[in-house]
Image: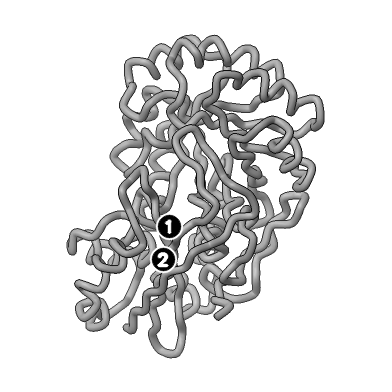
Amino acid sequence: MQVHLKKYTLPLKHTFSISRESHDFQDTMIASLSLNGKTGYGEATSNPYYKITTQSMMDEINAISSEIEAYEFTKPEIFHTFLVNKGLSNFAICALDLAAHDLYGKLLGKPLYEIWGTSIEKYPISNYTIGIAPIDVMLAKMQEMPWPIYKIKLGTSNDVAIVRELRKHTNAIFRIDANCAWTAEETIINAPLLKELGVQFLEQPLKADDWFGMEEVMHHSVLPVIADESCIVASDVEKCALHFSGVNIKLTKCGGLTPALRMIKKAKELGISVMVGCMTESTVGISAIAQLIPQLDYVDMDGALLLKSDIATGVHIEPDGKVIFPKLAGSGVQLLD
């Protein structure tokens, strides 16, 4: 099995800001795995919060590239175990696991959702994310991209006022993501005000390890709260079920589709809602996420929509939220260069 890695710098349409950082570009790594004339593609983006760079991922993978090339590939799940045993970071594993799943589907001639026994006749609509900015800039972004559901990034000194102003200009569903910037008291106070403004749920309002605070929020918030930074790997799901209404699973954080499928199953067993989110990936990563949507309650897969230019073709999202799946098997991905 041949392995190939390439770094890209993805330009964003607009400066993207959350409570802890801002950026105009997103660095990403594409991993390709080739076997029997078929090539699968996977992706993992850099992330300063988790101290991951494209170079660090490439260094990890290059260190075992000869072992990967000698590996006798059968199923992605078995390959995932091999990668875990090699001690790679979850981000590096994610890129390879996504490539392995895409390759597996292409070898079988079937899309992944079909291999998993799911149907794309019914699925949740992805939100479109509005990063923190002056209100007029946030409003302009909404008007540029009319959408049925917006995720609004908050973590400022006037969060409720921002939502109140944005609400004047759209009837779309709002989701709020504070990216760990609020306290439990702020969350409990803000929740009823935001509920009146048509907010569906809150995502990760408190710091990732503030379990005591989240217990207070769970007892007093009038809005559901979804875990993001508090839910990284499969073992986090059970703990999050005691402190959140649901979990937002990120493929890069957990290590790809293989653990994500386990996390989805566990969350459903525990009776909490399931969301999968993105990390501003290109169409490579987004197409992998899209294979999961029949199994989800919510999805945030707008990463490629936030880009000024893309590097691949694959799953496409229409302005009304409809997802167009390509005829190509696996994740349906092809690189443009």
Pinpoint residue 212: horizontal percent, then vertical percent: 32, 16
Instruction: State the image quarter where residue 315 is shown.
Output: bottom right
Residue 117 visible in the current orientation: no
Mark 2 surroundings: few (<14), some (14-19) or many (≥20) residues within 10 A = many
What is the quadrant of the C terminus in the image?
bottom right
In the rendered image, the vertical position of residue 169 relative to residue 330, given as above or below: above
Measure how far apart labels 2 and 1 are at the Cα level: 6 Å
Quickly name the residue at label 1.
45
* Residue 132 image point, x, y percent: 59, 35
Identify residue type, mark 1.
Thr
Which is more toward the observer, 243 or 195? Answer: 195
Residue at the spot x=62%, y=37% of the render?
Answer: 151
Q: Which mark is residue 113?
A: none
Measured as percent of width and height from the top left, residue 9 is found at 49, 64
Image quadrant where residue 143 sits: top right
Task: For the residues labelled 2 and 1, say whether their Cβ atoms are less than 8 Å apart.
Answer: yes
Q: Which of the two discs, 2 and 1, labels the residue nearer the N terminus?
A: 2
* Position above or below: 203 against 145: above
Seen at 40% across and 83% down, the residue is: 34
**Residue at disc 2, secondary structure:** strand
The location of residue 320, given as percent across then percent down, is 77, 50
- For badge 2, the amino acid type reads Met
Which coloring applies here? one colour
Which residue does the image show at 50% across and 16% down from the upper left?
187
Q: Which mark is residue 29?
A: 2
**Camera-nearest residue between 28 and 208:** 28
Q: Is 322 in front, or is 284?
A: 284
Looking at the image, residue 167 sits to the left or right of residue 123; the answer is right
Mark 1, other Cα within 10 Å: few <14 / some 14–19 / many ≥20: many
Q: Nearer the viewer, residue 154 or 241?
A: 154
